[in-house]
Image (cartoon, rainbow, N blue to C red):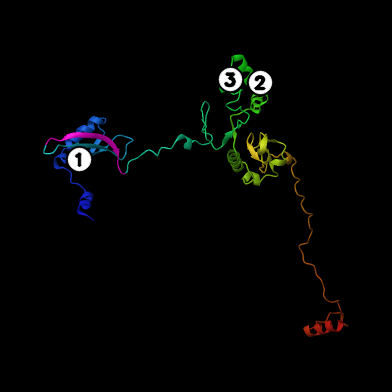
Amino acid sequence: MSAATTRSRTPRTPDRLCAEAVGLAREAAEEAAAPGVVGEHTGVVAEGDRVVTHFFTAEEPGYRGWRWAVTVTRASRAKNVTLDETVLLPGPDAVLAPEWVPWSERLRPGDMGPGDLLPTEQDDLRLEPGYTGEDEPPPNSAVSHDMADHLDAEDADLTTRTPSRGAISAVAEEIGLRRARVLSRYGLHAAADRWEEEFGAKTPMAQAAPASCVSCGFLEPLSGSLRQAFGVCANEFSPADGRVVSLAFGCGGHSEAAVMPKPPRPAAPVLDSMAPDAFPLHSARTDEGGSVPPASTDESAAEDLGHS
């Protein structure tokens, strides 16, 4: 590392006369700020040769951690210090506003209110041209707009209007179906994913439903390709009333769940006694005296074997 590099990274020593001009710096800060909001002197930083910045605490509410920075300087070999700049700057622990985000990235569903306008980008991926313009006449055609300007008014009216009566765009415009842009394939998929996440088969409501919306009488199917997977709920008691729902969605308001299931019939009661029942193992035998002789264990076992 060279000596010049070492000297460039070494902190400069503030100029003595500029560093001692605390009073001049405070007067400049108080003149720029409101009365009583310039706090104590917190430090001095050398900005260059005979250029020093004084820092004062900002006591103004809402500017915690901010400080007034007053830069003073003097000419070479001059003893008179002059004011250079006064500005309010954030300190290391200052409270700062969050990073600015464009409105198009901050906007969320539900943010639009009455009277709000939401312009759509010309290259929005969710939209695509509603017509391709294939039925437009070529530029050098006798019925094109460029060539019609060179014709008389009567001829231009006949040549520009009559051939376009059967054009696709003209017919669509006449019945009110012509749109400059329609949903693109990406727009359709994005909308389907959004609806499936909110009112789809994986929601807790659908998991506990007695049946899915595909068999519900309150479902109003959509038109176009989306009718294969979505519809509009028309049940006022359903949490999805007036919302686009997946055909696999379901809730307790299903039209075919009106018949309540019958309560289960309890089993027939089983009668039992709480006293033990006696079951004799041998037939009663009496001796000559009429009493039952006590039989030993061995004799009883031998008798059992004899009878078997």
Q: Can you tell which of label 1 and label 3 is closer to the viewer? A: 3
Say which element carries label 2: loop
Q: Which residue is mark 2?
A: 162
**What crowding class fits label 1: few (fewer than 14 Cα within 10 Å), some (14-19), or many (20 or more)?**
many
Lower position in the chain sequence, tag 2 or tag 1: 1
Depth order, front residue of 17/142: 142
User: Residue 42 at what x, y percent from top left?
Assistant: 23, 42
Which residue type carries mark 2?
A: Thr
Please tell me which of labels 3 and 2 falls first in the chain: 3
Q: Which mark is residue 238?
A: none
Q: Which residue is mark 3?
A: 148
The residues tagged by marks 3 and 2 sit, at their Cα atoms, a distance apart of 13 Å
**Residue span colored magenta:** 79-92
Name the main secondary structure of what is drawn in magenta: strand
The amino acid marked with disc number 1 is Val
User: Residue at 58% of width from left, 35% of height from top?
Assistant: 128
Q: CA distance from mark 2 to mark 1?
A: 82 Å
